[in-house]
Image (cartoon, rainbow, N blue to C red):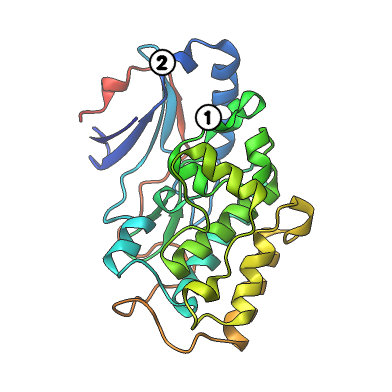
Amino acid sequence: DVYRARQNGDGNYEVAVKVYRSGYAQQESFRNYFMAEAEKIGQFDHPNILPFLEFGEGEGLLYVVTPFVAPGTLEDLLMRVGGRFSAMQALPIMQQLCSAVQYVHNHDVIHGNIKPTNVFVAADGRMLLSDFGIARRYDDGQQSPSRVGWESAEYAAPEQSLGVLRRASDIYALGVLLFRILTGQPPFTGQTPVEVLLKHVRQQPPSVRTLVPTISDAVDGVICMALQKRSDDRFASVEELSNAFLAAVTFAPVASPVATRPVVLPPPQPPSGQPLPVSAPKNRQTPVPAFNA
C-alpha cells in the first residue's frame, strides 16, 4: 500500500510512504534482504530515479519514503494526451528511462517492475523511475504466474513466468513500454494475468505498424528486437536499445504525430527551480505514524 503523507520538520513537504504487507516483516530473511536492497537503492544518484528519503521498520511494518510527485505518472500523462505519442515525442521519454535503467544495471540492480504507473512525471517534465520491486525480486525464486498482477503481467518478460529475472527482462519491459507509448496498448492482453503471461511466452507480438501505420519500419524493428522471446536475442544492454531507438527516430521519423497536442519534454538534466528533497536516506526503526497523513 502507498500513502500520501507530510514530512514534519525540515521542509515540511509531501511524501509518499510505501508500506509492505505485514507478512514480509515477519520473515527475518526478507527483512535482511529489504534493508540491504533499500540501502543500495537509497544511494542512487540519477536525475531520472525517484530517490529514497527514508526506509525502515515500524509497528511491525517495513516501509520506504519517497518524495510525492505531482502531477502524476506516465500513464496519467498518456491518458491526458489521448493515449499515445509519436516516435519523436516518445524519444525523450525513452532516453531518460533508458539512462535510468542503465544506471541501475551498472550498479548490479535489476528493476524488475517497469511499467507506466511506476514512472512519475515531475513538474519540469523529467521522467522519474520508481518502485524497484524489492518484494518481487525476493519472491522470484518461488514466483508462479498466479502471483503476478494484471499490469505487471502485461510488462513481464517470458522468463519471468518461470521466476527468472535478468537485465534482459528490463530490456523486454522497456520494449513493451515503448509499444504501449506508440500504440496506446500493450502487445498482449487477456482475461487473467496467467493468460497474459502465457501469451508473452508462446505468441509473437503484433507489429506496431499494424496498429499505427505511420510508425516507421526502423522503429518497428527496434521494438521487435527488444521483445525477442530468448533473452540472449534482445539488445545486449539498455544503452544499446536507447541508441537504436535514437537512430531509428533520427533517420526514419514518423510522418505525423499521434498525440492530441504537442508535448515537449526536456532531456535528462538536474532539476531546476525547487528541487526534490534529496539527502542520504535514513534507516530508521521508528513507527510509520511519524508521518502525518
Q: What element does badge 2 sit on?
A: helix
Which residue occupies the foreground of this view, 65 or 262?
A: 262
Q: Quadrant of residue 289?
A: top left
Q: Give the mark toward the camera: 1 or 2.
A: 1
Question: For mark 2, what is the residue?
Answer: 22
Q: Is residue 38 visible?
A: no
Residue at 49% x, 43% y: name it: 152
In this picture, is 112 found above or below 273? above
In this picture, is 254 found above or below 279? below
Question: For mark 1, what is the residue?
Answer: 146
- Quarter of the image with the C terminus is top left
Mark 2 crowd level (few <14, some 14–19, many ≥20, 10 Å Cα): few
Which residue occupies the foreground of this view, 46 or 169?
A: 169
Q: Looking at numbered disc 2 in the image, what kind of residue is underneath it?
A: Ser
Which residue occupies the foreground of this view, 87 or 14?
A: 87
Which residue occupies the foreground of this view, 212 or 13?
A: 212
The answer to whether residue 238 is left or right of residue 272 is: right
Q: Is residue 22 visible?
A: yes
- Quarter of the image with the N terminus is top left
In the displayed image of the protein, which residue is found farthest to the right? 232
Residue 76: % across, % down:
31, 57
Residue 154: % across, % down:
50, 48
The answer to whether residue 120 is left or right of residue 182 is: left
Q: Looking at numbered disc 1 in the image, what kind of residue is underneath it?
A: Ser
Q: What element does badge 1 sit on?
A: helix
The answer to whether residue 61 is left or right of residue 152 is: left
